[in-house]
């Protein structure tokens, strides 16, 4: 104990007189270790606390406070009481003593054994003896932290202080300027408001000290270590100002004043604050200011040029209206909601009767914002607006007016929807106008004006999506009209809109489409065109176009299983008729029919019923038709469209979408049937079974048969990974043989893709490794012998397998990609190899993508790029004649990389890319330009260092003979104009001179790019420009 | 703010769509002459000095009032102020002229004037716009150039 008292004395001595700050830490550690107590420390301090020198006293208190700051947790209640009494007393001491006293008090506020009443006495002395705003930054923070600590633990005691607490706080924060302290004091104010402290008569004072910061205008200094943002301050302040209705009478005039200011950010902040605040207000808080607020909001929406302010204004109006809607109606008082809405209607409604003037839209938006606030508001607004809109629509004759009116009506239909929460359809404010609305839409649909018709279809869709606005009888009329337009209208845009609309309607009212539309479409599609030359026919769309529309419409309506059950047989019937030739369908018709089937498979719900439909009916029928077509002899008069490559390529996605999406169990069945068909010629599951028994589709004897392997690919390569493919090894062998032996491009490519698709999904292990090694050996052998007749085939297999392995990060993929790099120097395959990189890096349409459940790892492109870019650079420098191949390969890879990666990798490759710009090969120039253009939007520093080289090469390319190169380089030059002005200003004169020439180019597309680019460069460095 | 606008609620016209791409335009070997629509497309993006609207939306420029002769290298533009007393007419004319000077090859002679009978001081404005030296002098004035450049800045849609 004696040694300890010596220790404490020496620590005190060194800290107080020796000014060694580190001793405070040691003392704190000693107290924690129990070497001496806080009481002993106080005794030891003795002289340090009572010295006549204020600085010595400050030092003494400092030591005590530092120790307390570490050890507040171990103090007893009695100790705390004594210490608080001591510190409170010290607050009256000399001003240099105050900072350590505050630190000590702050430490004590964190104690869990604060005696009752001490919080109050602490605050009383604090508010009485200290003028916070004359303290330094850190001490002010100390005071705020004390308050926050006490609010956390002693809420009840603080509230017992009543309004004195608020007054004390108001005095302490009045005039605070540091953003860090502001955040703290805003936090205190928020607590006061949201935790229900008594504001007493100081509500206005509290509002004054906080609202003086509104609207916040703060831009943090560069490299600000505190990371305080303007947003943070704005939100903190907003939660105070908008926190209580007691502020309403002060806040609302302030908001009106700030909305009227010229500063855009002030307008925005005010409107947003308004929208938040009124959510807590009642009508009486608002009543006096409603008119002023409305005037300000109206002016902003009518005149603003900023969409942000407009939408903030509209949101504020919605909030105001819903606040007024909450007010309870008394029998004697006036209805405040209708009074307010009368004001809105009076100012806006008359603009709706001038549909060609500017203010029609702002007025409509304001009315719609009010309309969406509550059900009652919807009723009042629609009652005021709809009759005149409908009346106008019926009396106006100009189509553009009628279209605007229709668009306005549509927006009203949508805004009423937002407030329609009840299930009861009768509550919809528009139910009363249903007949007029429907007749409006139907009359617009029967107009000859395209844009009017298009608008009408989207209004119809909006009507359908609202309960009770479209009855069955209306749907019937709609279906008739839509069908009529589809079959007779000339304009394709109208038909697209109609098809979209039928899709939306059919999902809600399938019965009408099954009974009326599908049979009608079927008749039209199967009709044999009559004499197209007659005058009657020339006014109508061509028969082919109608057929095309019917097919798209058929796909669009098929979202419900019930509709699918009716529509797919029609499409299959079409395919059968095309195959037999009973109706003269072209290959193009067949492709479109397949697309429709594909779209149905993509959009339909995955139910047992639809799965059955596709796996048991559609796929067997497609396979059967394709097989019949393939088995046709050469002697038939008319060959079936189903042997054409374009048709088969359209059949593949139907099969693959069904197998990947619908009912995995059934897909597994389909796969095993397909495999047995292709391996052993098992045709038992096909309809119309009259096939010979010895079919060998994978032997490659006849191209018509071997090309069917693409259908097998569609089936087995798109199965979920959990589904196993039967007879996999046999199948892989057969596919490999076919891909290395066939001379028919579609056959060997499809076999290679199918092989790759299966390899991608095969589980890791011995089996897979030996399979790959066998393939690599075979492929290399063919590629290494220059006289081999199947080098292209071997190359195709190699590139697809390489892709399959690369996607799943298989270690053996490098063997294949290295082979690909070495082929860049090859005399025959060099350029194909360069193009192969684009195949490796891009998503393929039919296999090896995520939709077909392939194993695709994220960021495989980046990985491939970072592992291999150096090889390309080296290869480029050592290559002799084939340099362009390397550049092409590089730009193929870089082109497909995500932009973030391009930007980070660019410095290393920039010299090569610039080289590529001066490479004479047009395709290299083009692909380099296309990968430069996105990078230029946000230029990396490395690029800015090379500006001179870049600008001169781009300028040279603007006089290239090829139009695409000219356009690409002009776009890049356009993008350059957005670089930092000081970097590009030196080039301005030169670029402007160079761009004068393409202004007179013979191609219009080149001229228009030049006009855009030159306009931007002119604005650079010019007053009012950039 | 409302006091500063001369015409707060102007008539708004529909914008014409993008020019449709024809097959011959994509063909390297065909020479596309500069036509009225092309000049009109250059002008449509010019902003009105008062409203956040383009000259096309306010119908100040129309395709039928654009006349170009590629072979003779002449362009004639008539523009129509929204109201007869529009004080911005000269400024709009100047913006059109500057835009064309920047966008057309040197060989063109550019004539910009007000549609006859649509403005109170038509002759004075036309005279100003036709006077090369006054146009050049106007563009030396940096505050005037600033306003013109603002009209020619493409808005971010």
Image (cartoon, coloured by chain):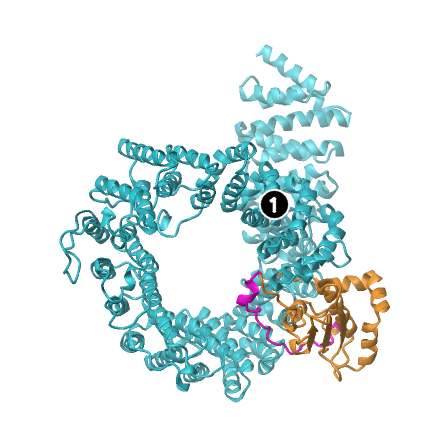
Chain colours: A cyan, B orange
In the displayed structure, B103 sits above or below A905; it is below
Element at label 1: helix
Q: Is residue A53 magenta?
A: no
Q: Give the main secondary structure, helix, strand or loop, of the magenta stretch.
A: loop
Q: Residue furthest top?
A: A3
Residue at 69% across / 37% down in the picture?
A: A139
In the image, the segment drawn in magenta is: B4-28
Q: Position of residue A837 (x, y in %)?
A: 46, 42
| Location of residue A652 in the rendering, given as x and y in whole percent from the top left corner | 31, 56
Give the answer, above or below, for where A411 lies relative to A392.
above
Can the viewer see residue A465? no
Image quarter of the N terminus of chain A: top right
Identify residue for label 1.
Answer: A917
A477 with respect to A418 (left or right): left
Whether A136 is drawn above or below A4: the answer is: below
- Is A716 above or below relative to B117? above
Chain holding disc 1: A
Spot occupied by residue A440 in the image (x, y as percentages of width and height): 45, 83
């Amino acid at each position: 104990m004696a040694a300890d008292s010596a220790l404490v004395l020496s620590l005190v001595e060194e800290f107080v007189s020796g000014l060694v700050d580190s001793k405070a830490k040691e003392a704190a550690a000693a107290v924690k270790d129990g070497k001496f107590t806080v009481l002993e420390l106080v005794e030891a301090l003795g002289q340090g606390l009572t010295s006549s020198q204020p600085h010595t006293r400050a030092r003494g208190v400092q030591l005590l406070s530092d120790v307390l700051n570490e050890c507040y947790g171990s103090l007893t209640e009695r100790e705390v009481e004594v210490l608080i009494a001591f510190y409170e007393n010290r607050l009256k001491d000399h001003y240099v003593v105050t900072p350590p006293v505050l630190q000590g008090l702050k430490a004590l506020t964190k104690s869990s054994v604060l005696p009752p009443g001490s919080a109050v006495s602490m605050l009383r002395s604090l508010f009485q003896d200290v003028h916070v705003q004359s303290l330094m930054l850190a001490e002010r923070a100390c005071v705020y932290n004390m308050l926050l600590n006490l609010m956390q633990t002693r809420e009840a005691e603080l509230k017992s202080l009543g309004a004195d607490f608020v007054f004390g706080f108001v005095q302490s924060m009045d005039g605070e300027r540091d953003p860090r302290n502001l955040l703290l004091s805003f936090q205190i104010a928020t607590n006061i408001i949201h935790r229900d402290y008594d504001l007493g008569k100081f509500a206005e004072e509290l509002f004054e000290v906080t609202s003086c910061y509104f609207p916040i205008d703060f831009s943090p200094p560069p490299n600000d270590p505190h990371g305080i943002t303007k947003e943070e301050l704005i939100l903190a302040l907003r939660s105070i100002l908008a926190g209580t209705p007691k502020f309403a009478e002060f806040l609302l005039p302030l908001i009106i004043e700030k909305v009227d200011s010229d500063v855009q950010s002030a307008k925005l902040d005010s409107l947003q604050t308004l929208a938040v605040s009124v959510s807590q207000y009642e009508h009486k808080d608002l009543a006096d200011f409603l008119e002023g607020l409305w005037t300000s909001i109206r002016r902003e929406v009518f005149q603003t040029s900023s969409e942000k302010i407009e939408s903030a204004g509209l949101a504020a109006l919605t909030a105001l209206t819903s606040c007024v809607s909450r007010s309870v109606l008394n029998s004697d008082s006036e209805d405040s909601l209708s009074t307010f809405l009368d004001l809105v209607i009076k100012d806006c409604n008359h603009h709706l009767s001038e549909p060609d003037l500017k203010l029609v839209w702002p007025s409509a938006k304001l009315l719609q914002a009010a309309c969406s606030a509550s059900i009652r508001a919807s009723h009042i607004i629609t009652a005021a607006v709809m009759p005149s809109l409908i009346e106008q629509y019926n009396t106006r004759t100009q189509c553009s007016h009628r279209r605007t009116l229709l668009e306005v009506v549509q927006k009203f239909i949508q805004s009423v929807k937002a407030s329609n929460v009840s299930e009861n359809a009768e509550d919809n404010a528009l139910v009363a106008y249903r007949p007029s609305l429907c007749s409006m839409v139907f009359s617009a649909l029967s107009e000859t004006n395209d844009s009017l018709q298009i608008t009408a279809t989207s209004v119809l869709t909006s009507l359908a999506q609202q309960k009770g606005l479209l009855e069955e009888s209306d749907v019937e009329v709609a279906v008739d009209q839509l069908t009529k337009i589809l079959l007779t209208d000339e304009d394709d845009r109208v038909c697209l809109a109609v098809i979209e609309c039928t899709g939306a309607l059919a999902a809600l009212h399938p019965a009408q489409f099954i009974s009326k539309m599908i049979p009608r479409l079927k008749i039209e599609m199967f009709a044999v065109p009559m004499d197209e030359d007659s005058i009657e026919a020339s006014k109508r769309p061509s028969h082919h176009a109608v057929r095309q529309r019917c097919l798209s419409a058929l796909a669009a309506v098929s979202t419900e299983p019930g509709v699918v059950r009716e529509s797919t047989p029609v499409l299959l019937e079409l395919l059968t008729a095309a195959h037999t030739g009973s109706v003269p369908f072209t290959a193009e018709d067949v492709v479109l029919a397949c697309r429709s089937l594909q779209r149905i498979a993509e959009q339909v719900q995955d139910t047992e019923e639809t799965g059955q439909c596709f796996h048991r009916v559609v796929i067997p029928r497609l396979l059967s038709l394709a097989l019949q077509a393939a088995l046709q002899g050469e002697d038939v008069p008319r060959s079936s469209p189903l042997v054409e490559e374009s048709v088969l390529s359209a059949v593949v996605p139907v099969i693959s979408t069904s197998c990947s999406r619908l009912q995995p169990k059934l897909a597994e069945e389909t796969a095993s049937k397909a495999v047995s068909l292709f391996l052993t010629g098992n045709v038992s599951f096909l309809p119309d079974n009259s096939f010979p028994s010895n079919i060998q589709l994978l032997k490659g004897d006849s191209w018509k048969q071997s090309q069917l392997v693409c259908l097998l690919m569609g089936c087995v390569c798109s199965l979920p990974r959990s589904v196993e493919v039967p007879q996999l090894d046999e199948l892989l062998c057969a596919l490999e043989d076919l891909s290395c032996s066939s001379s028919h491009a579609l056959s060997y490519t499809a076999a290679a893709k199918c092989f790759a698709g299966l390899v991608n999904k095969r589980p890791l292990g011995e089996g897979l490794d030996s399979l790959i090694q066998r393939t690599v050996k075979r492929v290399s052998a063919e590629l290494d012998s220059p006289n081999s007749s199947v080098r292209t085939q071997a190359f195709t297999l190699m590139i697809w397998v390489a892709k399959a392995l690369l996607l799943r990060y298989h270690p053996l993929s490098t063997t294949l990609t290295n082979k690909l790099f070495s082929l860049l120097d090859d005399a025959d395959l060099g350029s194909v190899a360069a193009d192969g990189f684009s195949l490796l890096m891009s998503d393929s349409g039919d296999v090896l993508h995520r939709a077909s459940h392939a194993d695709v790892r994220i960021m495989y492109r980046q990985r491939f790029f970072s592992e291999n870019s150096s090889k390309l650079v080296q290869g480029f420098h050592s290559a002799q004649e084939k340099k362009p191949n390397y550049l092409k390969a590089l730009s193929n890879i870089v082109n497909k990389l995500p932009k973030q990666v391009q930007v980070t990798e660019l410095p290393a490759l920039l010299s090569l890319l610039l080289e590529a710009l001066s490479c004479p090969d047009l395709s290299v120039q083009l692909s380099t330009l296309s990968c430069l253009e996105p990078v230029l939007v946000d230029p990396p520093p490395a690029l800015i260092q090379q500006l001179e080289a870049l600008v001169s090469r781009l300028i040279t390319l603007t006089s290239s003979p090829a139009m695409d190169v000219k356009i690409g380089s002009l776009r890049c030059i356009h993008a350059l104009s957005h670089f930092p002005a000081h970097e590009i200003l030196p080039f301005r004169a030169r670029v402007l001179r160079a761009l004068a020439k393409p202004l007179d180019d013979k191609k219009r597309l080149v001229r228009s790019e030049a006009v855009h680019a030159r306009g931007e460069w002119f604005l650079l460095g010019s007053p009012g420009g950039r | 703010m409302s006091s500063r606008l001369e015409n707060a609620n102007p008539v708004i016209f529909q914008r014409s769509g993008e020019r449709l791409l024809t097959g011959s335009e994509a063909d390297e070997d065909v020479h596309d002459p500069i036509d009225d629509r092309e000049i009109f497309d250059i002008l449509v993006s010019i902003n009105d000095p008062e409203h956040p609207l383009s000259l096309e939306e306010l119908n100040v420029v129309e395709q039928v009032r654009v006349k170009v002769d590629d072979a003779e290298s002449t362009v004639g533009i008539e523009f129509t102020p929204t109201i007869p007393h529009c004080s911005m007419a000269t400024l709009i004319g100047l913006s059109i002229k500057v835009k064309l000077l920047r966008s057309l090859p040197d060989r063109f002679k550019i004539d910009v004037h007000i549609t006859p009978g649509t403005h109170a001081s038509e002759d004075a404005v036309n005279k100003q716009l036709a006077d090369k030296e006054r146009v050049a002098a106007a563009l030396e004035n940096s505050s005037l150039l600033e306003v013109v450049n603002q009209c020619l800045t493409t808005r971010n849609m």
